């Protein structure tokens, strides 16, 4: 009987290789992948390093030079130029009343005026052209009663004027606008300084279309213009601190055409149109404190309300009980011995809606009408004014937001509010006078 043997098979080396995993090949592939990753990391590192070097060595210095030549941060240079003649300062860094104050304090200290207009940005268009003595417009340096006090303190620490024209916005007396009118504002910090944010600004504006390539390449800078808005739109503050709203009055269509935007805010009771049930005694006391402190220092305060466009005021009157801080304000302040000129409704001053910049900002012609009205509240203002020049400007430029300026002769005002306002279509026969002082 044959014995059955085990089935023993012989495997060749080739069979063994085929059945065994190729460990060396896998290691080689992993090595190549790691090398490729390191290569990408090195490339990214070198790219990042190059961008940093470009930024530090080229982009940042180029931005710094551009900002200097543009005058965007050049407050001191602007004030010096304005002390010698007409120059505009219009920086995009001017974003709040504190920013405006940082510039205007330097201007105020340089000019040392006898008359100063302080308070509401709504009166920013009042110019010194009809004044016989030095005047500075400090409007826009406050947006509340606490800021008004702080701005006046800062001014008086540098120079004491004879007269302060106090322009007030009615919403400053609303607790919804400012809860504590005696609050201490934050310390003043000037925004007109070089920083990473300001150095990025020219490049950002170029990419976003805020400035054109020729403007970015130093091909469009003007003399006696400091700041982006002044350089490219002739918009900004003049030597007396008044605001030249050139980009607004020459626009084809205002953002507040027909006062639609302001009327919408009023309808929604938003922002400055927030309602309240009664007058805040604390806010009345805050203004009384400001007023009598000025008088105690031998300064004459002349108080008035910055005007509101007629359609907006009519909408508020339809809800009169919701706005005691406007319609009951003059009587409440009179009880405290403070006379407030009745200037909230410019229609009583024979002004037209065409003379506004928007629903809450008066144009230059309305500002002159208000100035004329203030002489009735305090006749002591008359020696400071050239009434002939004032009346001539009002008569020749009625229905306009701005009086023609010899320094901006090519500026032609449009019907920017879309109110069918008839505007001049060519150079005016007469321009506003230049102050003799």
Image (spheres, grey):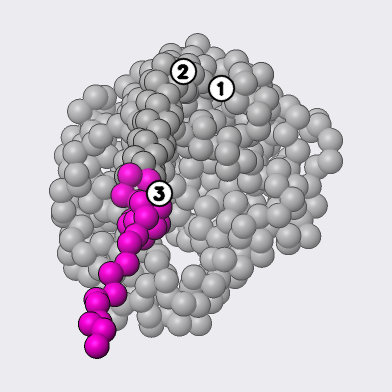
**Left or right: where 247 falls relative to 371:** right
Q: Quadrant of the N terminus?
A: bottom left
Neighbours of disc 1 within 10 Å: few (<14), some (14-19), many (20+):
many
For this orientation, the residue located farthest to the front is 1
Vertical order, 83 against 325 (above or below): above
- Percent of width and height locating residue 301: 31, 43
Q: Which residue is mark 3?
A: 120
Q: Which residue is mark 2?
A: 58
Residue at point 27%, 39% (across, down): 151
Label 1 residue SS: strand
Q: CA distance from mark 1 to mark 3?
A: 25 Å
Magenta-highlighted stretch: main secondary structure? loop
Label 3 residue SS: loop
Comparing 26 with 122, the one in front is 26
Vertical order, 5 against 65 (above or below): below
Q: Which of the 4 image quadrants contains residue 427?
A: top right
Residue at point 51%, 37% (across, down): 204
The numbered mark, 1 or 3, whose residue comes first in the sequence reads 3
The numbered mark, 1 or 2, whose residue comes first in the sequence reads 2
The label nearer to you, 1 versus 3, is 1
Vertical order, 32 against 282 (above or below): above
The number of numbered discs placed on residues in the rendered structure image is 3
- Percent of width and height locating residue 419: 73, 61
Q: Which of the 4 image quadrants contains residue 45?
A: top left
Label 2 residue SS: helix
**Left or right: where 137 falls relative to 151:** right
Q: CA distance from mark 2 to mark 3?
A: 42 Å
Q: Is residue 247 visible?
A: yes
Q: What span is colored magenta in the figure?
A: 1-25
Q: Are marks 2 and 3 in contact (CB under 8 Å)?
A: no
**Left or right: where 162 falls relative to 405:** left
């Amino acid at each position: 009987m044959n014995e059955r043997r085990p089935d023993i098979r012989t495997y060749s080396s080739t069979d063994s290789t085929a059945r065994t995993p190729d460990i060396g090949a896998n290691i080689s592939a992993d090595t190549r992948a790691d090398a490729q990753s390191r290569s990408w990391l090195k490339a990214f590192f070198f790219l990042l390093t190059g961008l940093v070097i470009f930024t530090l060595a080229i982009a940042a210095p180029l931005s710094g030079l551009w900002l200097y030549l543009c005058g965007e941060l050049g407050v001191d240079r602007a004030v010096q130029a304005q002390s010698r003649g007409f120059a505009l300062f219009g920086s995009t860094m001017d974003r709040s009343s504190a920013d405006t104050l940082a510039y205007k304090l330097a201007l105020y200290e340089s000019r040392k005026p006898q008359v100063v207009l302080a308070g509401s940005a709504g009166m920013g268009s009042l110019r010194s052209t009809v004044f016989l003595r030095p005047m500075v417009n400090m409007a826009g340096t406050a947006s509340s009663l606490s800021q008004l006090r702080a701005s006046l303190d800062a001014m008086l620490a540098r120079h004491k004027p004879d007269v302060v024209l106090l322009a007030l916005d009615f919403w400053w007396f609303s607790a919804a606008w400012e809860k504590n009118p005696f609050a201490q504002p934050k310390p003043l910090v000037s925004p007109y300084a070089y920083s990473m944010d300001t150095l990025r600004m020219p490049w950002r504006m170029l990419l976003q279309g805020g400035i054109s390539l020729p403007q970015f390449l130093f091909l469009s800078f003007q003399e006696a213009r400091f700041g982006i808005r002044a350089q490219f739109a002739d918009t900004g503050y003049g030597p007396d601190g008044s605001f030249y709203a050139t980009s607004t009055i020459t626009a084809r269509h205002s953002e507040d055409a027909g006062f639609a935007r302001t009327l919408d805010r009023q309808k929604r009771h938003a922002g400055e149109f927030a309602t309240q049930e009664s007058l805040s005694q604390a806010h009345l006391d805050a203004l009384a404190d400001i007023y009598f402190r000025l008088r105690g220092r031998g300064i004459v305060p002349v108080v008035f309300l910055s005007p509101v466009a007629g359609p907006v005021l009519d909408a508020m009157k339809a809800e009169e009980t919701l706005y005691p801080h406007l319609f009951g304000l003059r009587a409440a302040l009179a009880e405290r011995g403070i006379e407030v000129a009745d200037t909230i409704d410019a229609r009583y001053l024979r002004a037209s809606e065409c003379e506004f910049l928007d629903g809450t900002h008066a144009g230059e012609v309305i500002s002159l009408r208000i100035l004329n009205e203030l002489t009735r509240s305090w006749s002591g203002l008359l020696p400071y004014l050239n009434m002939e020049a004032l009346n001539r400007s009002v008569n020749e430029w009625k229905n306009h937001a701005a009086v023609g300026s010899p320094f901006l002769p090519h500026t032609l005002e449009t019907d920017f509010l879309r109110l069918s306002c008839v505007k001049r279509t060519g150079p005016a026969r007469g321009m506003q006078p230049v102050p003799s002082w």
